[in-house]
Structure formats: structure tokens, C-alpha cells
Amino acid sequence: MSDDTQTIMLSALQHYAYCPRQFALIHIEQVWAENYFTAHGNLLHERVDSCEPEQRGNVRFERSVAVKSQQLQLTGKLDLLEIEGKPATKYFPVEYKRGKPKTEDWDKIQLCAQALCLEEMREINIEEGALWYWQVRKREPVLFDETLRGVTLAAIKGAHDLLSTGVTPPPTDNKKRCRACSLFDLCEPDTFRRDYSQQYVEKMFLELDN
Ligand code: SF4
């Protein structure tokens, strides 16, 4: 990573994976807006945070576990860690989400990054974890295979690189994503898309003139 003092929150990776501009608005420009989705997500995590660790049979359930990685310059919490056996033979991270399973990798990237932190901290290997979706009350298994690890490492690098530049990128072309975005009003994607395309045309004419 380019800057030794630059640590990223695990939750920020999801912002980056959703839209690099959203990540930049929140983590570079420090703007934030709470809509129904984020408010509900926060409530869900508060509920998870309030629970005590417990032992059920051969499995210990630890909640709201702090994790970090020196190597990847990441820090944050994971909602639930299931630890099987005494001494431990299997670690299984679980992240709670308010919505339902997605085709995109955003949630999986955050969970995989949590696993990477745990692996570094405890010198272990974690093969899988799960995402629990409130809306459908469903637990979705996630395999930490080479592909997901690669996508996750790319997102971590991308987020660090963007933070280093300190420059907010243009809006995504994915308008559907914008409509569900908590920062829509602050981002003004349509206005900025027009500005960026105007700048692009002006730049092209400038290059043709020279
Ligand atoms: S409104 Fe669209 S472009 Fe703006 S941050 Fe959200 S997803 Fe990204």
C-alpha cells in the first residue's frame, strides 16, 4: 500500500465496491446522508452489537469482533464469529445485512476482507463464512476461493489508491444503482455526468486544435 498511515474501515470497502464515487464522497469529502436503508442497517448492527458471547455445544459465538490487518491496512468489526472446537479447529465469520442476497459481490467482498484480517491476526486459514439477510431471513454461505480473494484484494487496493489521490471520480453510468444510493441528493449524478461529458467534448476539441 502506498501510505503507511492510511487505514481503511472494512465497511468502506462496500462503498467502494458499490461505487468508487460513493466511497470518495464519504471517505474523502466526508459527506453522509442517512436514508431508510442505511438507518435500518445501523439498527440491525446495534442489535447484533448488544449481544454477549455464548457457548452452545462445541461452538463459541463471539459478537462484534474487532479485526485489523497491518498488511492490508484495514480495520473494523465483524458481526459474528463462530469458533468450533476446543482448541479451535474452525473459524466461521458471519455478517448481517438488512436486504436480500445480491448478484453483485459487494457484501461478499466485505466478508472476505474480514476473513483476510482474521487470517493475518490469528495465523489461520478460513475457507468459508456466511451472509445473513434480514429481509429474507436467510443465511447465504460464502466460499473464500481464489476468485473472491482476488476481487477483494483488488477492491482494497482500489480504495487505497483512490484515497491517496484525494480526487472524487465521476458518477457511475449505472443509473439503477444511483436510484438506490443514500448519497443521491448530495452526489447529483445527473448534473455531474453532464459536466463531465461537457469537459470531455471540450478536451477533445482542444486536442484537435493543437
Ligand atoms: S448517486 Fe450514483 S454516482 Fe453518486 S455516489 Fe451514488 S451510486 Fe455513485
Image (tube, grey):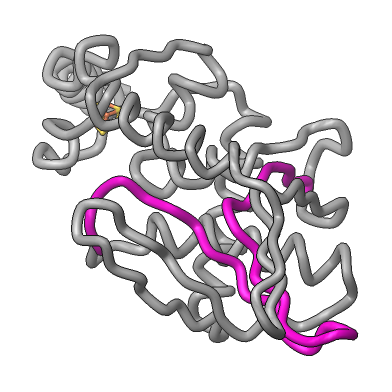
**Residue 152 shown left or right of residue 210 in the figure:** right
Name the quarter where the C terminus is drawn. top left
Q: Is residue 138 magenta?
A: no
- Which residue is found at the position 50% from the left and 68% from the top? 151
**Image label count:** 0
Q: Position of residue 77 (x, y in %)?
A: 66, 45
Q: Position of residue 200 (x, y in %)?
A: 23, 26
Q: In this view, does 138 lie above or below 18?
A: below
- Which residue is found at the position 82% from the left and 36% from the top? 3
**Residue 88 shown left or right of residue 202 in the figure:** right
Q: Position of residue 52 (x, y in %)?
A: 68, 48
- Which residue is found at the position 65% from the left and 74% from the top? 56
Q: In the depicted view, which residue is nearer to us: 110 or 186?
A: 110
* Residue 5 visible in the snapshot: yes
- Magenta residue span: 73-101
Principal secondary structure, stretch drawn in magenta: strand
Q: In the depicted view, which residue is nearer to us: 86 or 171?
A: 86
Q: Is residue 73 above or below residue 206?
A: below
Tell which quarter ligand 1 is in.
top left
* Residue 208 visible in the snapshot: no
Q: Position of residue 23 (x, y in %)?
A: 46, 32
**Residue 105 shown left or right of residue 101 in the figure:** right
Q: Does the magenta stretch include residue 87?
A: yes
Q: Is residue 168 above or below residue 93?
A: above
Q: In the depicted view, which residue is nearer to us: 16 or 201?
A: 16
**Residue 52 shown left or right of residue 206 in the figure:** right
Q: Quadrant of residue 16?
A: top left
- Which residue is found at the position 75% from the left and 46% from the top? 66
